[in-house]
Every structure is written in structure tokens, then in C-alpha cells.
Image (spheres, helix red, strand yellow):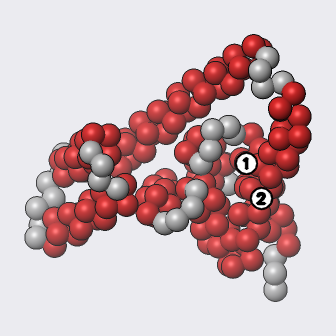
Amino acid sequence: MMNIRKLGELYVSFFKIGGLTFGGGLAMLPMLQREIVTDRRWCTEEEILDMYAIGQCTPGIIAVNTATYVGYKQAGFIGGVFGTLGLVSPSILIICLVASILQNFIHMPVVIHALAGIRVIVCSLMLNTVFTMAKKGIVDKLGGVLFAGGFILACFTPVPTAMIIVLAGITGVIAKKFGRREDA
């Protein structure tokens, strides 16, 4: 039997996340973490980190992938649909509204300055998420090396992000298999 209440909770929770965050999928991570892990307890801290990692490896926006996964975990396929629709509905509504009126105001200094301020805050929210994830994700020396190596590759080389993630996964498997993981 389909749990209508659970589907409603999924839709409303993800609608709130989608409607109250600016800056795209990565900017939603702090709110996703608070709503999913802290408030709703639909996932653990470790599960959400795994979802972020998988979301980076799969096509699409990380927040949408996470909403789909959490929804699926809570209520099966239809839960995944409701979580995803909840997350993207505000964006669709807001984009339609903004597109219809923004052309008239985009050149105004107040709009330009407001958007500049929003960009700065979104960057700080993303950095907060990186620090939070790093505290939970870097648990040993190998994790520190992988973090540093991945950061260098992502920032200073043309190596695709998906390749960096695959290489890190392979390195983790090999290190675990041969017992070379040292606790920090």
C-alpha cells in the first residue's frame, strides 16, 4: 500500500530545499544535509556523503540525484519521483516567473548588486559544505592524500572529474585489499 503521507513529506521537504536555496545543486548541499540527516533522519551522515559521491559520478545535478535516491530509499520508485519533483518544482516555477520579468530589470544596478551579493553567499555556503564533508570523509592518511591529489587534479589539470573519482575509488579498493590504509 502506498504511503501517501510519506510521499507528501518527500515532496514538501524537497520543495522547501529547492525553493529556498540559490546557486544550483552544490549550493543546496547544506540544506539537504540539514533536512535529510539532522531534521528528518532519513539518512545518516555517511549515507549522505556516499550519495554526494555517487551524485558526482552520475549524469545530472547532484541535488536532483540525491533527492531521487532519498525518495527511493524512503518510498521506492514513486518516492524517488516525488522527491525529484519536489526539488525541481520551485525552480521550474521561479524560472518561468523570472524569465517573464527579468529582461525588464536585469540592467538595473540594484539587481546587478543583489545578484553579486547572492553569488558571494552561495560560495560561502559551498565552502561550509566542503569543510563539513572533509571532516567526515577524511578519516586517515590515505584519505588526506586522495583529497589533496583530487583537489590538485581537479583544479590544475584537464583530467575529467569522473576520472578523478574513479581513480580515487580504485585506489581505495586496492588500499583496503592490501591492508595499506593507515588510521590517522
Q: Which amino acid does the dot numbered 2 rest on? A: Gly
Question: Is 31 in front, or is 161?
Answer: 161
Which residue is drawn at the image coordinates 84% and 68% (left, top)? 5
Which residue is drawn at the image coordinates 68% and 37% (left, top)? 22
State the image quarter where residue 175 is shown: bottom left
Which residue is drawn at the image coordinates 73% and 48% (left, top)? 18
Q: In the drawing, what numbered circle is on residue 153?
A: none
Which residue is drawn at the image coordinates 42% and 44% (left, top)? 133
Report x, y in % for residue 8. 83, 64
Give the residue pinned by disc 1: 18
Q: Dot 1 lies on which element?
A: helix
State the image quarter where residue 109 is shown: top right
Report x, y in % for residue 66. 59, 60
Q: Are marks 1 and 2 in contact (CB under 8 Å)?
A: yes
Between the C-alphas of marks 1 and 2, the distance is 7 Å
Report x, y in % for residue 111. 76, 20
Is residue 8 something that shows in the picture? yes
Give the residue pinned by disc 2: 86
- Left or right side of 4 for 142: left
